Image: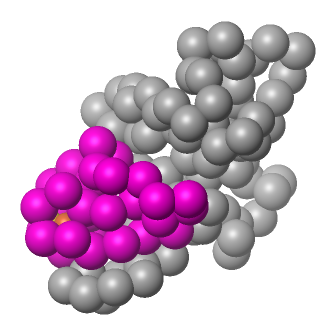
């Protein structure tokens, strides 16, 4: 699974996904990039992006309840840290992808890995 913590910043391509006024504090936006669902969260003015996929069975996770930085999968309750995609509880045992986020002017951009 891709995780920006381990990514080489030289191999990232930043794409604009929204403007800052589209995601209010505590809100999330789920977008589609080339067929991949990615969720962007605004937590007190800081933005985080994860793949909208639960590693338990590859279903969507991002519409689950958010408790601080923990997203709770709405189906079987696995928890993930939206800051880095790390799995926190069973039944999932594998991290989910997380992406770096930057703000350029009024735009929210996420870094996607460039295919080798
Ligand atoms: S699908 Fe997410 S915990 Fe089962």
Q: Residue furthest right?
A: 105
Q: Is residue 20 above or below residue 44?
A: above
Q: Which segment is the magenta one?
A: 53-81
Residue at image position (34%, 38%) is 37
Asked whether, in this view, residue 55 is left or right of residue 96, the answer is left
Residue at image position (22%, 50%) is 60
Residue at image position (34%, 85%) is 89
Camera-side residue of 17 and 88: 88
Asked whether, in this view, residue 99 is left or right of residue 31, the answer is right
Q: What quarter of the picture does the C terminus occupy?
A: bottom right
Q: What quarter of the picture does the N terminus occupy?
A: bottom left
> Most prominent secondary structure in the magenta stretch?
loop
Q: Is residue 37 above or below residue 94?
A: above
Instruction: List x then y, in percent, for residue 31.
Output: 40, 27
Residue 26 seen anywhere in this rendered image of the structure = yes
Report the number of numbered marks. Answer: 0
Asked whether, in this view, residue 86 is left or right of residue 65, the answer is right
Which quarter of the rendered image does ligand 1 occupy?
bottom left
Q: Is residue 104 magenta?
A: no
Q: Is residue 101 above or below residue 87?
A: above
Location of residue 14 by image quarter: top right
């Amino acid at each position: 699974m891709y995780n920006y913590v381990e990514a080489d910043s030289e191999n990232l391509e930043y794409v604009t996904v929204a403007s800052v006024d589209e995601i209010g504090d505590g809100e999330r936006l789920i977008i589609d990039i080339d067929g991949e669902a990615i969720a962007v969260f605004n937590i007190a003015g800081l933005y985080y992006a994860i793949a909208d996929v639960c590693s338990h069975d590859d279903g969507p996770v991002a519409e689950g309840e958010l408790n601080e930085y923990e997203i709770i999968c709405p189906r079987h309750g696995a928890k993930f840290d939206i800051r880095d995609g790390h799995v926190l509880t069973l039944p999932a045992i594998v991290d989910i992808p997380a992406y770096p986020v930057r703000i350029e002017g009024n735009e929210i951009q996420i870094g996607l890995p460039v295919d080798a």
